[in-house]
Structure formats: C-alpha cells, structure tokens
Amino acid sequence: MIRIQNLEKNYRIGNSSITALKNINLEVSNSQFVTLMGPSGSGKSSLLNILASIDKPDNGLVEVFDYNLNNLSQRDLDKYRRSTVGIIFQFFNLLPYLSALENVSLPLYLSGISTNQAHLRASESLEMVGLKDRMQHKPTELSGGEQQRVAIARSIVHNPKLLLADEPTGNLDTDTSHKIMEILLKLRKEKSFTLWIVTHNPEIGRLGDLQIHLKDGKMLDES
Amino acid sequence: MNLKLFSNFLFLYLSQHKIRNLLILIGISLGIALFVSTGYNGIRAEKSLIDFSLGFNGDEFQYRISGNRTDLPEEIIGKIFYDPKLESISKVSPNLKKDTNILFSSGESLRIPVLGLNLFENGLPNPDSNSNPETNSTSNNSAILFSKALYDKMQENDKVEFEFENNKIIFDKSEIGLLDNEGGMYALLDLQILQAYLENEDRITYIYLHSDSPSKQLETSIQEILDLFPNTKLESREDILQRAEGALKSFRMNLLVVSMISVLISLFMISQNLSGLYFQRRKELAILRSIGASSLITFLLFLLQALVLGIPGTILGIYLGIGFTEIFSISVTTVTNSKQVLSYNQLPWNLIILSLLIGSLGSLFAGIIPSLRASRTSPMGMIREGNSQKLPDKLYTWFLIIGFSLIIPSYALAFGFEKNTFTGFLAIGLLLLGQILLFPPFFRFLALIAPRNFPTFKIGVEEILQRPLGNTFASGTFMLSVSLVLTLSTLTASYKKSLLDWVDRENPFDYSIVNSYHLENGLSGGVNKEVINLLKDMDEVESIDPFVIISQFEIGTKVYTIHALPFDKKDKKENSVFISSNLAYLENLKQEDILSIPTKLSGTIDFKIMGDREHFFSERGTIIMDLDEYERYFGIESFNSIRVKLKKNIDGLKFQKDLKFKLTGFSQLVIFDSEGLKDIYLSGLDKVFGTLESLKWTALFISAISIFAAVLHGLYDKLKLFGTLSILGATRRQIFSTMFASALSLTLSGALVGIFSALSLIPVVLYVINKNAFGWTLRFEFPWIWIPILLISVPLLSFLASIYPYWKIQKESLRNIFHEES
C-alpha cells in the first residue's frame, strides 16, 4: 500500500517560493496501475520524484509499503532504491559503455549479488522484454525503443514492488510507444508490482486503474 | 553580436565555476612561474658572470692585459703609451682588483672584489653610462664608492671594516658614496690609495685598452711589447666573453631543461582544461547558434575563453616567478657566488614579454581545435551530441602505431650524432610526444582489464574513456612529472655514485686537512706548508699526500682545473701531465698529444699528455700534474689539502685529537675523515643539482593539481551517471569508489607510462646529453626509493583528488540532476 497524506512540496527559486505540491492525499493499493496527468508545472514529476526518493516532502506523510519517505536514513534509502522501487526515465539513462546485459545487471551488482547470478537474472529480464538476442549490444547499437526496453528490464530485475515511469514513451514514436506500454502492462500482470506512469498522453492516461489529474500542484480528481 | 553576450558567456562562466577555474589558473601560473623564475635567475647569473669576467668594467674597452696568476708591472703602461705604433689606442686604464674580506658593524661579513682605478683621471667604469663620479653628487666627497647592492646593505650599518692584507681600514657610513650600477657587489677606490693600503705601489691586475680602430695589426703590436714581459696575456673583449660563455655552458643546459619542461607543463594544463570545455558548454553554444550567432562568432567566443583563462594565469605566473625567485632558485656556476648573482635586481622585461607571449600563444593554440569544432557543428548537432568524446576504435590503433614510430627512431637520433646535444634534446622531445600518444590506447587497455566483479570500479575506469583527449593531458602531466623525477633522480644518483666511487679509489687516505675558510669561499690553498713538517714528526703517520687545486685556470679562451698531486715514481716524467677523461672526450685529446700550458714562473710550456684518468672535479676538464712539476712552474704558497694515511692498528680518534692539538696555531684548518671528505664532495654536487630538486617538487605539485582538475572537470559530465547510480541503489561508498577508480586510472596511467618514459629517457640523458655536454661516463644508479614512494602516492593522490568532487556530488540534489537533463 502507498499512502500519501497532506503532502506538500515547495521549491525556492531565487527569492521566491513556488508550491509544487499542495494538500495531496491518496491511497494506492498493491498492484494498482496509476496514471498521473496534468499540464506542465502541475507537479506530476515532483510527486514521482518524491515516490522515487529523488526528493523529500516538506510536509505531510508519504508511506510506500513499509517505508516512511519523510525521514529515511541513508542506509534505508539505499535499501529502498535497491529493493522496493524501480524507475524508468524518459531518456533511458543507460551507461553507454556497458552492454544491455550489464546495464540490466547494474542494480544487482550494486546489491552485492555475484556477477554470474546477476547476469542470469538480467538475461531473464531481457527475455521478458523481448531482447534475448540483443544482450551483448551496447546502447548505441540499439534503437530508441530497444533502449527503453533495456531500461524497463533494468527497472524490474530486482523485483520491485513499485515501478515508476516518467514519460516512458515521451521520446518514442507512436508504434514503439504502444509496444512499450504493452510490455509494461504485461510485466505488471506477471510480477504484480504497483505501476505509476507520468504521462501527457491521454490514451495512456486512460489505461490507468487510478487516474490522477494535477493542476497547479493540487489534485483535481481521481478516477 | 552584443558585447554583453560576449562578457556573459566569458565571465559568468568563470564566476559560476570558481573552483574548477581556480585550479586551471594555479596550474598555468605555476608552470609559467617556474619558467620565469629559472629564466630570471639565469639572466642574473649570466650578467654576474659576465661582469665578473670583465672585472666589473662596464667601459667599452677593446683589449685587456692581465698577468698569468701574477700582478703586472707598471712599466707596461709607459711602453704602450709611448709606442708610436699604438697611436690608435685612445685610453689606457690600469686596474687593481683585490678580493677582500669586509666586516659590517652588524657583524655580517662578506668577501667582495675591491677595484682600484684612476678615478680622477679616467672616470669610472660603469655599465650605466649616465652615472659618472664627476656628476654623481654622492661620490664627489666620498673616500670609497660602493656598488648599489653593497650600498643598500650598508644602510643598516654605521661602519664597515676592510681587511687589506696587513691593514685593516674602517670606513664610516658618511665616507661611502654610491655607484649607481645595475648589479654586482664591489667597492671602488682610487688606484694609488688601494695600492697604499696593500703596501705595494706598483701593483696592477689589469690594463684596459681602448681603441677607435682595433685590428689584428694593433694586437700584434701590443703583443710585441708584452713579449718583453713574461707571464702576461692579451685578450680582446670578445675573448673574455667567449670564455664566460664556456663557463655558462652547463648552467644553460640545466636552464634549458627546466624551461622546456615548465612551459610544457603549463601548455598541458591549458590544453587539458580547454579540451573538455567545448562539451561542457555545448548547450550554451547551441542556443547561441540557434538564435543567430555565426560560425565566426562561435569560434571567437571559444578562443576568447582560452585567453580569458590563459592570460590571467600567465600574468599571475610572471608575478609569482619573479616574487618567488628564491624558491625556484637555480644554482649558478662555480665561477661567481650567489650573493653576487642576487645583487642583480632589474626586472627582466624581455623575459616577461616572452612569458606573456608563450602563455597567450599557448592558450590560443590550445583553444584552436575546440574553437574550430564549436564553429563547425550545427545547433542541432550540438544539442544531440552526447557527453562522450569517444574516439573511433581505429584511432586507438593509430595512436599506438604513431607513438611507437616516434619512440623507436628517437634513439637512433640520440645516439647517432656524436657530441651533439641538440639532437639529444630533440630525441627527448620525440620520446615524450610518442609516449603521450600511448595514453588513449592505455586507457582502453585499463578498461579491458578492469575487474568485472567490481562494477562501480569498472564504471569509473570506463568513464576515463569518455574523455580520452582531455584525460590524456591530465595523465600526461603526471607522466611528465614522474618521468622527470625518476630521470633527474637517476642522474643525481649516478653522479653521486660515480663521484663517491672515484673518491674511494683516489683517496685511500684516513684523514684530510683542509682550510675551512678557503673551502667555504671557493679559494685555492690555505693549508700551510709547515703542516707537513708537523705531520712528519708524528709516528702514527705512514704517508703524507698534499695537493693543490686551481679551479679557474685559463688556457686561451677555455677555463680548466689543475690538480697537482704527488705522482708515483713510474709516472714522474718531465713536462708530462695526465688529463681527465672528460677533458680528453670534450677536446679530442689523447695520449702523446701536446698541451701548451702558460706557467707563472717559466712562460708557456708544452706538456705531453701521458694518458687520461677519471676525474670529477670539473665539468670543464682537469689537468693532473705532478706536485713537484707544479712547484717548479708555478710555485706553491700553500696546499688545498694534505691527506694523511695512518699506519696499521693506530687509534684514529686519538690521532685526530693529537693532530687537532698540534694544529691549534692554525685556526682555520679542520680535519676530515673519509666520510667527512665525501660529504664535502657531495655538498658541491648538491649545489649544482639544487635546482633540479625544486623543479622535481614543483612538477609533482603541478601534476597533482592537474589530476585534481581532471577529476573535477569530469564531475559535471558525470552528474547524471552518479545520479543514476544513486537511484539504482548505489551506496555512498560505491559512488566514491567509482570516482576513485576514475582518479586512480588517470594517476596510475601517468605513473606507469612515466616509469616507462623515465627508463627510456635515462640512457639518453646520461649517455648522450650528459656525455656530450661534460664528457663524463657515469656509473648507472637507479633511485629505487621512488618506486615505493610512487606506489603510496598514486592511490593517495587519487583518493585526495576524489574527495572534493565526491563532496560536491553529495551536495547536489538528485532532482536538479534529472530535472536539468530532461
């Protein structure tokens, strides 16, 4: 379960303070698919960043499964990132000099899992996203869609409970975008993780079990 | 384009990246400071030596007559003055020069030349033609004139005492006039007054001749007169300057090495930092291009960036170089002393302008390629281009091929041209260039062997390959320093070993008696002949071996050393000498050749060379003469040293104590055992190599800054990498290890290639440059102590270089990292 109560987030830019999120309240059950929509500056990325532990809330409560994201120690933060959450970025963020297999293995390396074991699990992940034959290729040798699939494989290799995707199809053409969404939804079914997607695309937005609209940092509605 | 845009592009960047740009400035300025400082000291030393050689005579004389280790008779003046063939001689200036000890009222003592001239007839010899005692109001009523440096010293004192052989003369401050010259520490008196103080009315050291029409014919006519007076010598001004040139040779060699390397290090620092600048600022450039900036504007903007960093760095370096001359001091020749050298204080404007040119042109040169790149890429290309400056795979192979293609033939160049130091230096240049080209392939090799079981470490090593050219300069600077340190340390160690081995062979004696005052002041003699009689009375003594050294013996335009010592019976032959092996090499002399030596008592004598021997007294060459022959031709007033060998089973300490007691009446004499003697020889060597020590440590310091700057530079390119690793769950330790791996790759590459570089340079420096310059064949000795020092320094430096960037990363918010990139 993900529980957010009275969440508030402000940013200081120069001498002024900007409210990114105000009075956000919601509960998300396990394995739900959440879509987060809104115009630019509405606070969708800010909310995702807090869930991803990239940022901290100023006020309110954010509980993700057993983690209270308000005051995690560094050790717990590392543990949260390694075991509980997976993240997919719009611009992939793959390491260009590692192969697809090594990129996917990276979270496992960081957890101290042996190279052989990590590669075994990574290859399973890559197979799930249909890249079994491209494991040894470097990101520069893959298309945009293939790179995003590698990023997806990396985000699920450690069996997270929560998968966050920030505009995962924002950099891809329509056809590829559909394929990526198919993969994400398929994986969600197989692995039962909670999926949050930030999107500008209303088509993708409508796919969510829970659709959240933000405007000026506030929730408009959820459906 | 708006000027405000220019200034914002250039200066706002500086203010927003203070630490990074500060490191660049420090690196550039230190390299230039070293260049300026060694050059400045070099200029001072040259001026000092030339003034000394000319007898501190700034007049434009054409000829000088001097005695061969003896005074000149005053008669010569009359002969020259009245000879009808010498009518073209317009002025005859006799000069008396006496090195004298002076004692200030503060207690400080100095040894300076005191010059006696006909002050009231001929004016003053003065390099500054605007200064003349007749017009200089401070000198008109003065009893004695001091050069400017000496006069400044006098300001802190009331009186000064001169020790003129049997007379001590005290001058009050009010009696001292100022001679407004450029440099040098000396005093000026009227000739007759000085002769009176020395109690020798006829004494003259030099006669300076001025002529409006110097010619070979005139020289011949003068020589005809001098032939009537044995032990006299005629030299032209050019002859004297040529001799000074010879004495400066080894000094200039050191200077060239130091200057070359310091300039190279500065240029590397500029290149290293500018090579990454294009990628760091590409988005700004893309924006400018997309709103209408032309290729030319983009090119100029980038080039100006290079100057905005390079010129202030150069100016700072010049200021530091002049200000810290003492720190980057270069040891001067053995002909003049450091106090004389330091008295030359005029700002070296030529050097300052040259340094400005080098710094500015170097910065421009370093900025051209990134500027061209910036001007040629389209706005979309700049936005789309990644952080990576990766090279195509083919290029790594080319670097390897070209690198070795430069290294291998450079040996042929170095060893193929006998007695040519220029080709030796060229070979060194090619060797270094070839070795630098090996860095990109070496980085790739490191990435290949990086342990896969340590992924954060592997990532750190791989990151180096994302900026191969910029990192080449960083590692290259470290390589230069390591190579320099090892090569120079090997040179010093080899000299020391060769010298000590020679001392052991040539000095199988237990004790040496030396005059400490003469030793400290570089004077000949000092050990009274009576000491031999004292030693003969001591039963413990098995053998006594006195010797004499004349360290500035002139033969023609060259200066040598004479070492007179007792020969074995079999070597005692009339009019025969040995020469040092370096003299034989440098002057192409061999056994049976004849060496004409001007002697004090019997004119010029032809000596036959019996052979050559290893000898380390002089880089100019040594003539080794039997002591009896020396006494016959030069006379002996005192010895430089008397060496004593004891009989077997004698208590050395007791003997030393007894001898000290016997020598009580000779206050300046000291006794050295064999270890003490070695220390004396080594201290002489340390003076010569002192400059190399400052160069080594400065180079290491600059290269450490280079590594710091490289790691910091890469930081901003790697923010996203570290952000991604953090998001994926990397701990702080893992983040640090990634950074440490990058720094270690740079430092380790520099160290390993540096060791390889040193091993390749050492034969060239020892057996080509040193051999061609000084003729010595040294015994190779490698300074192994540096290997453990490097083994500790490399990881330590890498660790330290990672601390600040790591701290920066921790402060950076992940949100900002990902927000900026999306």
Image (tube, coloured by chain):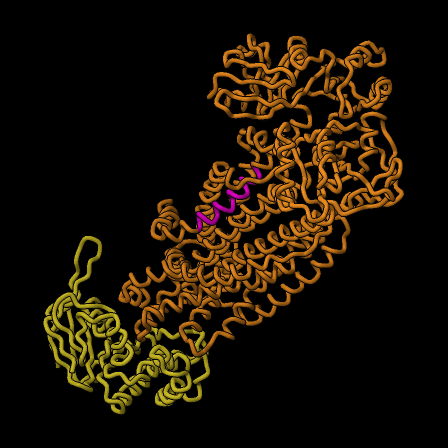
Chain colours: A yellow, B orange
Residue B629 visible, this orientation: yes
Residue at position x 84%, y 45% in the image: B611
Q: Is residue A130 left or right of residue B235?
A: left
Q: Is residue B316 left or right of residue B396?
A: left
Residue at position x 45%, y 41% in the image: B316
Q: Is residue A84 above or below residue B243?
A: below
Residue B291 x/y as whole percent: 37, 56
Residue B341 x/y as whole percent: 58, 31
The magenta stretch is B24-40
Residue B507 x/y as whole percent: 72, 45
Q: Quadrant of residue B456?
A: bottom left
Q: Is residue B708 left or right of residue B449?
A: left
Residue at the outermost bottom position:
A190
Residues B634 and B513: in front is B513
Residue B125 x/y as whole percent: 65, 18
Residues A1 and B678: in front is B678
Residue B263 visible, this orientation: no
B78 drawn magenta: no
Residue at position x 57%, y 43% in the image: B691
Q: Is residue A36 above or below residue A193?
A: above
Residue at position x 33%, y 60% in the image: B807
Q: Is residue B663 above or below residue B413?
A: above
